[in-house]
Amino acid sequence: MADKPRKSRSRFIYLLNVAQRRLQAAIQNDEPGRTAARSGLLMAISPSSEGTQMARLGQALDLGPGSLSGLIDRTEKAGLIRRCHDPADGRAWTIVLTEAGEVARKAAIDGARELNIRLCEGFSDDELDIVARWLEATSQKFARKDI
């Protein structure tokens, strides 16, 4: 007969959801107008003048086409990015940071670095390796089908 799961294991879904909401709130409270999604987008865009193809951004952010388009629309409206036709593929778009976007990207990176430090406080490297392995395995087990 299988052992009963420990109480902490039976609460993984709840604990992940609470942690995710609180992390998003921490990101958003850090700077007015900042969201976790926008921060992720800005960090995923190459800081070079060549930018990054939308398809690559969708893969990097684990977003489907509709969600990615909406995020790009909102971020472009905020003046942080601009769309350019991809010179290598006329059907594709490349996303490039504006000057304001470069500043926001740096702030997002700095904020993420600080949050990562806070997240790691009180845990050994071995413990953090296990958490990272578990989160990566969870992402693979429940991979999106539309990307």
Image (tube, helix red, strand yellow):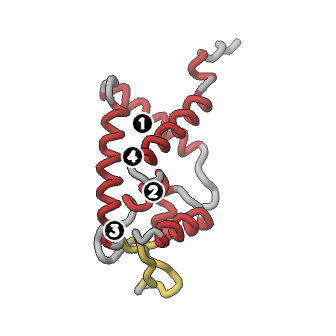
According to the picture, the residue beneath numbered tag 4 turns out to be 30
- Which numbered tag is attached to residue 100? 3
Contact between labelled residues 2 and 1, with CB atoms less than 8 Å apart: no
> What is the CA distance from the residue labelled 1 to the residue labelled 2?
29 Å
According to the picture, the residue beneath numbered tag 1 turns out to be 132
Contact between labelled residues 3 and 4, with CB atoms less than 8 Å apart: no
Q: Is residue 19 above or below residue 50?
A: above
Q: Amino acid at mark 4?
A: Asp
Residue farthest along the front direction in this orientation:
32
Disc 1 crowd rating (10 Å Cα; few below 14, some 14-19, many 20+) is few
User: In the image, is 112 to the left or to the right of 76?
Assistant: left
Front one among 116 and 73: 73
First in residue order: circle 4 vs circle 1: 4
Q: Is residue 43 above or below residue 89?
A: above
Q: Position of residue 98 (x, y in %)?
A: 35, 73
Q: Amino acid at mark 2?
A: Gly
According to the picture, the residue beneath numbered tag 2 turns out to be 33
Q: Position of residue 60 (x, y in %)?
A: 46, 58
Label 1 element class: helix
Q: At 56% from the left edge and 29% from the top edge, which residue is drawn?
A: 15
Q: Amino acid at mark 1?
A: Ala
Q: At 44% from the left edge and 36% from the top edge, which residue is drawn?
A: 133
* Comparing labels 1 and 3, the label whose residue is closer to the camera: 3
First in residue order: circle 3 vs circle 2: 2
> What is the CA distance from the residue labelled 1 to the residue labelled 3?
33 Å
* Comparing labels 4 and 1, the label whose residue is closer to the camera: 4
User: In the image, is 85 to the left or to the right of 7?
Assistant: left
Label 2 element class: loop
For residue 102, which quarter of the picture?
bottom left
> What is the CA distance from the residue labelled 3 to the residue labelled 2?
13 Å
Contact between labelled residues 2 and 3, with CB atoms less than 8 Å apart: no
